Image (spheres, grey):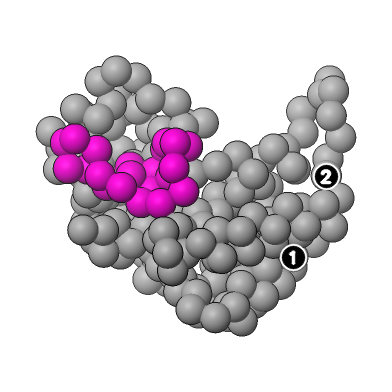
Amino acid sequence: MAVYRILDLLRDTGVPATFFVPGWVVDHYPQAVQAIVAGGHEMAIDEERAALLQGIESIQRVAGRAPVGYRSPAWDFSPATLGLLAEHGFLYSSNMMDDDRPYRHGTGLVELPVQWIMDDAPFFSFRPPAARSISALATVWEAWTAEFEGLHAEAAARGTCFVLTMHPQISGRPGRAAQLRRFVQWAREQPGVEFMRCQDLARSVP
């Protein structure tokens, strides 16, 4: 249900998105994956090393094309990751937190940097016995809008990007999805803002 709620939000706001999906999920929930593709969104891999080939094959079979982007679970890389991605013809990675602008690795692979503050999990993920509480929606709104404004102020001079990371099982809850819709609508009103799939942003990097 949560995936379809997010897809409705993206359709209604006209926002293109990238879904990072493990091959196992593609194989077990093909209807959801087909709905993502039908919505014009990008499918990319969310797995590492041993499952990379399975992920490529699963996405190609269900989506009709091979993925060009990669995100590892919890953004953890192994020493082999960049080489594996180059070997299998990937266009971009979205795992590093060392910049707030897209850049190229030595292999030529484009990096679309991420940050924990722009991820829903640190605010909303909860598993007892947890030492922290679930954040209020107002707290998340304040954090995301402040980070967006900071990056937006530097965008023209430095080419910054805002990579918001959402998990359907977390942000697909009704109240959170409503706030995500509100955030998208607010961001769209800011001057010079463009929403892009990851692959389209990666292809624009010189």
Q: Position of residue 114 (x, y in %)?
A: 49, 44
What residue is pinned by disc 2? Answer: 135
Helix, strand or loop at label 1? It is helix
Q: Is residue 3 magenta?
A: no
What residue is pinned by disc 1? Answer: 179
Secondary structure mostly seen in the magenta stretch: loop
Viewer-closest of 37 and 79: 79
Q: Amino acid at mark 2?
A: Ser
Q: Position of residue 180 (x, y in %)?
A: 68, 64
Q: Position of residue 126 (x, y in %)?
A: 77, 33
Q: Residue at x 74, y 65 (%)?
A: 179
In what quadrant of the picture does the C terminus appear?
bottom left
Q: Residue at x 74, y 68 (%)?
A: 178
Q: Position of residue 42 (x, y in %)?
A: 36, 60
Q: Is residue 95 magenta?
A: yes
Residue 202 seen? yes
Residues in magenta, as a range: 93-113
Q: How many marks?
A: 2
State which quadrant residue 6 falls in. Answer: bottom right
Please give the label number shown on residue 18.
none
Q: Earlier in the sequence, mark 1 or mark 2?
A: 2
